[in-house]
Image (spheres, rainbow, N blue to C red):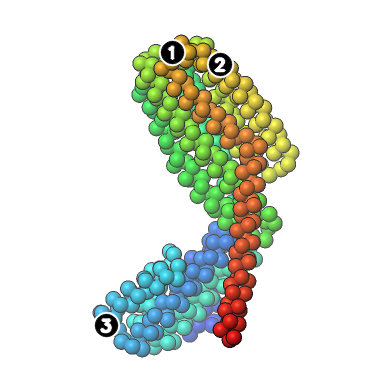
Amino acid sequence: MRSTVAATLSYVVALWLSSEPVPLTAPLTALLVVQVTLYSTVTTSLRRVTSVVVGVLIAIAFSVVVGLSWWSLALVILASLLVGRLVRVEEFIPEVAISAMLVLGVTQVSDTAWDRVLETLIGAVVGMLFNLLLAPPVWVDTAGDSIEDLARRMRLLLLDVADEFTGAPPVEQAASRLHEARRLDNDVADVDGALRTAEDSLRFNPRIKEGLLHRVVLRTGLDTLEICAVVLRVLARTLTDLAKHRGGHQLLPEGAAPAIRETARYTADALVSFAVLVTTRGSEDAQAAETRLAAELRAARTCRDRAADRLLALALADPGSWQLYGALLTEVDRILDELDPEHRGHRLMEELDRRVRERSERRRLPSLRDRWDARRATRGDG
């Protein structure tokens, strides 16, 4: 509905201001400009207008010099595509060539050229004003749901891996767990796309006052889960190696298997608690999630220490198995360290400092350049 109304309004305005009888460029631009976020709307508008203006200027230059022929058309297309890359209009690179060809193919080049620029500006302005008056939705909740769903899928996989450690799965079954862990990469990519949309929806949005903090919290949370997904894939690989090494016998001896299983189960629950902590906005809910996460991490570390003592005793009797036992404990430790609230706090502060520093540097760059130019000019005059 937002796109339809914006396109219709831009067409009405173009009928009023443009000399073209059917100014369809204006509603076309409005459709392309009215994106799902205000940030995308602004950036798309700038790229769209730039591509049309550049194409029109190229067409005017060629019409004055050579006119229209098969070889001049080829030169126009080539020049438009090259210049489009130089001005970085991204997905609107073909629009530069399209604008140049449409303008070059008419008799009254100048009139058609500036009408096309005018219609493009009308569509872009109407699209931006429409999104300013009716702000697009904020997609933080959608991204948060995606992050929690990813954590739950990782939890289920880790629970399955934990059950395998107490049994004697065949190599094929253990390998299937490894394939499931590898498919988590696709899930992480999908969540990353949802998070990018959420980050864009927080930029330039008048309803959000602390957009940077929300973006950093969600991004660092997803980064942590992505690291845990990689470690979980390595853990599934260790499971496969253990299945090969044991040759159909129980993967872990009776003394260590229950402790490892309980460690994995507490760690699996901690993954979901961490995701809830990252995506929760209310202070009370966040405090409850953090308390639950801390309790699960303590329980997981207690079980881990108990399992380590038993595995060490077993490894002393069978030194050849210590490499796999040590890898198993190391991978569990990595997940627990990533989920630790203190580790998350340090990482969050580092990312916030980096973002703020980059923003301040971008603001200082123009003034530094102006001072440098002024100093060079003064030296030149001297």
Q: Kindly identify the amino acid type of the residue bearing the numbered disc 1.
A: Asp
Q: Can you give x and y, in whole percent of width and height, for residue 205 in the image? A: 64, 60
Quick check: 143 above or below 28? above
Question: The N terminus appears in which quarter of the rendering?
Answer: bottom right
Relative placement, left or right, of 184 versus 76 is: right
Asked whether residue 5 is in view, the answer is no
Give neighbour class at mark 3: few <14, some 14-19, many 20+ (Cα, 10 Å).
few
- The CA distance from mark 3 to mark 1 is 83 Å
Q: Which residue is mark 3?
A: 69
Q: Which residue is mark 1?
A: 318
Disc number placed over residue 309 in the picture, else none: 2
Q: Specify the farthest residue to the left.
A: 70
**Quarter of the image where one finds residue 245:** top left
Q: Kindly identify the amino acid type of the residue bearing the numbered disc 3.
A: Ser
Q: Kindly identify the amino acid type of the residue bearing the numbered disc 2.
A: Asp
Q: Nearer the viewer, residue 187 or 7?
A: 187
Q: Earlier in the sequence, mark 3 or mark 1?
A: 3
Tags 2 and 1 in contact by the CB under 8 Å rule? no
- Tell me what residue is drawn at x 72 percent, y 37 percent: 287
Q: Earlier in the sequence, mark 2 or mark 1?
A: 2
